[in-house]
Image: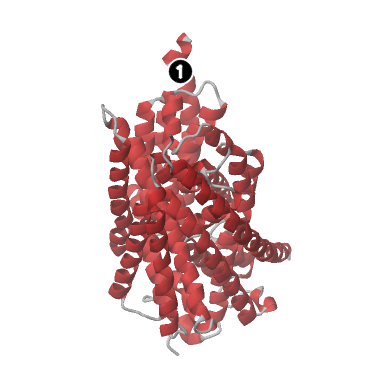
Amino acid sequence: MFWILLWKFVLILTLVTYSLLTIVVSIGGVFDVRSMIDDLKSSSKPEN
Amino acid sequence: MNVFATNFATLDWIIVCVYVCIPVVIGVVVKKYVRQLSDFFVAGRTLRLFIAISSMTGTEIGLVTVMYNAELGFTSGFSAFHIAVLEAVCILAIGLTGFIVYKLREMEIMTIPEFYERRYGKRTRIVGGTILALGGILNMGLFVQAGARFMMGVSGYSDPNGLKLFMTAMALLVLIYTVLGGMISIVLSDFMQFIVMSVGMIVGSVYVINNIGWTKLFEVPATVEASSWFNPLSAGSGFGILYVAFMSIQLFSAGALWQSGTMRALSAKSPKVAKQIYAFCSISYLARRVIPMLWGIGALIFITQTPQFLAAFQGEKALSPQFGMPIFLAKIIPTGLLGIVVAGMFAAFMTTQDSYVLCWSTVITQDIVAPLMKKGLSDKARLLLTRILIVLVGLFPVVWGLWFEAPVSLWNYMAVTGTIYLSGAFSVITAGLYWKKASSTGAMIALLVGVLAVLGIGPWTQKLFWAPNPIPWYSTDKFIGLAVFILAFIGMTAGSLLFPDKNKKEK
């Protein structure tokens, strides 16, 4: 019984937390991509 | 009813084919940003938190990961969940403490063997780099084979040669965008693929639970023993205490030091971000195992309900357990949606394949070839060599997968090939970072002892020990894996105490 309860908890925890992580990273990632491209653009410009 | 009957239709093929071409476009677009070595290898160390999480998740959830975890769920049930929990705890611990990864990022190195040279000298770097490349390339040897099996099960297309051609084309697509844009195109593709893959995994799980039913999911199928289905310590589960001990140390060391994952920490904008990536990714590491295992468990329950399907997995000509999950998904997910789930799985294949080929090619260039050249290698020569190696390393799984059949489960093959590098590296790097007396002789002993892990891959072990069936405990992959970790640790400690570095003594 202990093992069944434990694995039920692990399964629910995984599905809930991974769904939340997907939402947060998908939104936050868009901003990160923009910043990353800006960083690369500025670093690839020749210095005067 | 045909065991390979499927809902996968022309619409799904179109979705998959269109989708897999997008990263190539990204590779072409970002090529202009690759100006120097660090841009190509570590994306100019510009990775912020969210994009780094998506990239690390994408790398660590491959189609092969989905396949070997589904196989574990199919054969061992919920007892396999212990591997997921152990791994998530290890990754979270690394994220919270910064153990190893924080210091490595602070040192601004590009590869793990680069650390060997700074701490122990050039000779250790070359030997360590060679062992890392050997273990890593062997480790990815079955990626294409597992991918072909997934496609065969899910599409119902049963000509193995046609599938190998399809997978070879997939591997070539990955090579094109990796050669062009290096780490920059990888992280951008990884971000897009993270979204598709995650949606695919969540949608797939909803369908599995909905099809089987929550209560029935936790009932033991008629073909397996009740206690071993849930309890990993039970004798019949195929795991046991020895396996759990091996997994604990293997997963912890892999979490901190598996080059493809560690490269994300090394590409992070700061050491603090490197720590945060690990803390958040503990969720991804949990999901990368639990979700495919759930699919595998669902597959076995589904198959045991239909005698015809069950018969296909029994007897002399039984299908590999790896076919269970894709055959199951192909029957329960409707056309159109199945294409999206399969595109998600191909996203998983591509994100892992691209990172691995870049990773091992980088190691061969930076840590083996360049240190061996007396006059050194120019940046241009390094980039060219890495691009050539990307093609060669990328084609290896196509050739290896054609003729090699893992004698153990797919996961155990991955674990043992990973141990070739990890067992030595874990002691060498931990001691190098946290123990002043660590010496180059100790490091060399530990690294070479690690190579003994190759004995854990089935047939070689059996030949060496003339072992009858069943294999005795001392020649099983789990015992050899654990023993090699312990021996490498002893080698590192004894070697350092008995043969301290001379220059340190003088200082």
Q: Residue furthest top?
A: B506
Q: Is residue B239 above or below residue B3?
A: above
Residue B349: give x, y in percent of width and height.
44, 63
What residue lies at 54% left-to-right and 82% top-to-bottom?
Answer: B332
Judged from the image, the secondary structure of the residue bearing numbered disc 1 is loop
Q: Which residue is mark 1?
A: B500
Q: In which quadrant of the rendered view does residue B73 lie?
A: bottom right
**Left or right: residue B368 compared with residue B200:** left
Q: Residue furthest left?
A: B374
Pick the residue in front: B73 or B113.
B113
* Subunit ID for the residue under disc 1: B
Q: Is residue B395 left or right of residue B490?
A: left
Going by the image, does B71 lie left or right of B176? right
Q: How many marks?
A: 1
Residue type, mark 1 in image? Pro
Q: Residue at x 49, y 43 (%)?
A: A42
